[in-house]
Amino acid sequence: MEHAPDRLARALAPQLTTRLEAMILDGTLPPGERLHEQALADRLGTSRGPLREALRALEREGLVVSGGAHRGMAVRRLEAREEAELYDARALLQGFCCALLAERATEDGIAALQARVDAMDAAIQAGDANGYYRQNLDFHEAMLDLAGHARTAALYRSLVKESLLTRRRTLASPGNMRDSNAEHRAMVEAIRARDPETARRLGEEHVKGGKRRWLGGL
């Protein structure tokens, strides 16, 4: 029979997982930060039981890592090799997604993508790096939704979640934002032209361009 504290931990853990994930992805809990259970439980207004459940869920997602016996958990810090591999895998999926969009996207869907590209241009003009970052995430989410390929979307989102641990700072530079959004615009133009092969190539090149920008910042 499950005890009441276990039931409570199981009920609260999903909410805590969502809150902790947001804190990791927005940089409130930066890569490498040690997660002291009691201090974190106090900060979130919970007990250590539900918190442990949430941390185990985040460990399965690759966002936190265990330091071994008696060392607790820490926010995962990606090695350069791991980050490079994430870019390589994302490039293939981005290209596939763009090719699908060139075949499947409706005119309204393409217009919605174009509107996001224009919004990112406005963020660049305003010097709003945080706004650009959010719009960039929304743009890629919209592409996944419009492509309508559930397995690709799940794989891509999993890879993006891991790469967000370090990706934000790559997009903070005005030059990088301009280059990135020029690539977004070219992808949308190829999708509008119903040219799957060009769209695929530009999708892959966009992520490879992100990899070059990341390497340039190391």
Image (tube, rainbow, N blue to C red):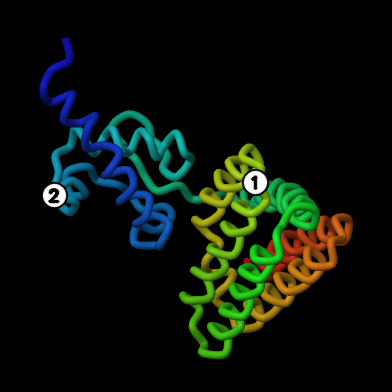
At numbered mark 1, what does the secondary structure look like: helix, strand or loop?
loop
- Camera-side residue of 180 and 187: 187
Q: Quadrant of residue 216?
A: bottom right
Residue 48, compared with residue 36, is above or below; it is above
Side of 193 where 213 appears, left or right = left
- Camera-side residue of 88 and 76: 88
Q: Quadrant of the N terminus?
A: top left
* Circle 2 residues within 10 Å: few <14, some 14–19, many ≥20: few
Residue at the spot 85% in from the left edge and 56% down from the top edge = 196
Residue at the spot 66% in from the left edge and 42% down from the top edge = 149
Kindly check if marks 2 and 1 are in contact, taking CB atoms under 8 A apart as contact: no
- Camera-side residue of 30 and 124: 124
Place of residue 183 in the rendered image (x, y in percent of width and height, measured from the top left): 74, 71
Residue at the spot 20% in from the left edge and 31% down from the top edge = 9
Write down the residue under mark 2. Answer: 45
* Circle 1 residues within 10 Å: few <14, some 14–19, many ≥20: some
Residue 168, compared with residue 127, is above or below; it is above
At numbered mark 2, what does the secondary structure look like: helix, strand or loop?
loop
Side of 137 where 54 appears, left or right = left
Nearer to us: label 2 or label 1: 1
Place of residue 42 in the rendered image (x, y in percent of width and height, measured from the top left): 14, 50
Q: Which numbered disc flags the more N-terminal residue, 2 or 1?
A: 2
Q: Residue furthest front?
A: 107
Residue 117, compared with residue 199, is above or below; it is below
Place of residue 176 in the rendered image (x, y in percent of width and height, measured from the top left): 65, 77
Q: Amino acid at mark 2?
A: Gly
Residue at the spot 37% in from the left edge and 31% down from the top edge = 68
Write down the residue under mark 1. Answer: 148
Place of residue 210 in the rendered image (x, y in percent of width and height, measured from the top left): 69, 64
Q: Amino acid at mark 1?
A: Gly
